[in-house]
Image: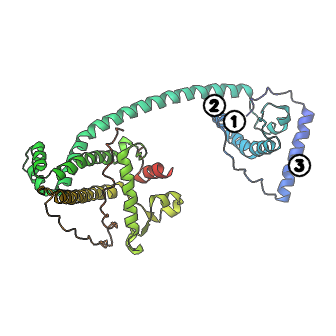
Amino acid sequence: MRKPAAPAPIDPATLAREIAVETGKAIAQEFRKEKPEPVVAADLDDKEKRDVAVLAELEAANPKNAGIAKAAENFFKKVLAPYRAAWQEKNPGKKFDTDAEEHEAIYAQQPEIDPEEFEAATKAFEQKDKERQVEARLEARIKEHEKKNIAREIQPKIENVATSEVVQLIKATEPEYEKILAENKPWQEMWDKMAADDPIAADLIGKSSRLVAAAAGEFEKLMTPELEYAFDPVKNAVHADIARHIGDYEQRLMSLPAADRVFQGKEFTTLEKFNEMTGSERAKHWIVEWNDIRADYFPSFAAQVKLAMTKEREKAAKTAERMGYVKPESASKPTPKQKATPVETPAAKSKPKPPSTSASTDNLTAGAAPSGGSKTFADQVVESLFGG
């Protein structure tokens, strides 16, 4: 918007003619019952947004200016935007100069504003804007401080959850060693006995326990909304593995019959498809949530560790046999037969669960989690994986 110019002296005769012309146009418009010009969809640029905000201050300062901010916004969108677009098309590569004489006629259509009032409103807006910026910075610092406090508060819980998941990993893979911990004996005693009895198990479970502990901590942080902990599978190796598991979980859910994927009258859909849906379409579908992924992640990981142990024992047994050595005790352990887990048909009121994962050792190389919005699971995953 151009800076308002000082008002020119009013010529009564000219004013009378202008009023007559405008009145005649209005009567003719009503008589022909013409429809108003359609609104041209156009976003305001930063300067235009600022001008509208200044005019809002002008309205607040003087009731006689009521509606002037909206009038200016309509001018920018309905009058100036199409005019400027047409001008740019005729003058490619040239900069649109708002002060150029050739644009006088179009800017004459902008709302009439008192220059002194506009200047005063601009100063008031700038002062309030500075105050808002100070408040925003202060609020950001307070929020960051609060998040640090929350992080400290949940740290004991993270440690407990991580320990619990490592215990569950041991129980799922080598339950006889978990009994040592159940007797409240030191962890080192359990690790020493495992290393002496079964070096293969000690090696794989030892490495995997660090990954499980890291993942448990990451899940806890991601599932604490107040922490606003970002899901970042690009920079965070544990998040990358969780993202891989989300994709696997969704594929297994999609393998169920269509009728078994319905929950509370809604159809299941993947996060990628959910991201492409309209609001009304999303209302008809359900997606996986953090609780679903967490509940499936650790048992699946344990199954992968168990499979890796079986493969390593078989490899060690073959090597010992080929070399003519006595088979190590850990290699001679009988491999329990794996029973196929049947696909459960979910009850009518329970959320559908996918078939058990096919055990794989592909994700046992994930790195430790680096230290790190109150967003939903869908928001975080969609934004990080599919660009939001």
Can the viewer see residue 164?
Answer: no
Horizontal and vertical percent position of residue 66: 67, 38
Residue bearing the label numbered 1? 65
Q: Earlier in the sequence, mark 2 or mark 3?
A: 3
* Helix, strand or loop for disc 1: helix
Residue bearing the label numbered 2? 61
The amino acid pointed to by label 3 is Gly
Q: By what rule are the colours in the image chosen?
A: rainbow
Residue bearing the label numbered 3? 24
Q: CA distance from mark 1 to mark 2?
A: 8 Å
Horizontal and vertical percent position of residue 265: 41, 70
Left of 375 or right of it: where is 186? left
The residue carrying pointer 1 sits among few (fewer than 14), some (14 to 19) or many (20 or more) residues within 10 Å by Cα, namely: some
Q: Earlier in the sequence, mark 1 or mark 3?
A: 3
Name the residue rendered at 7%, 45% in the picture. 185
* Helix, strand or loop for disc 2: helix
* Helix, strand or loop for disc 3: helix
Q: Could you say which quadrant of the image residue 31 lies in?
A: bottom right
Q: Are marks 1 and 2 in contact (CB under 8 Å)?
A: yes
Name the residue rendered at 79%, 27% in the picture. 5
Question: Any mark on residue 182, and which?
Answer: none
Q: CA distance from mark 1 to mark 3?
A: 26 Å
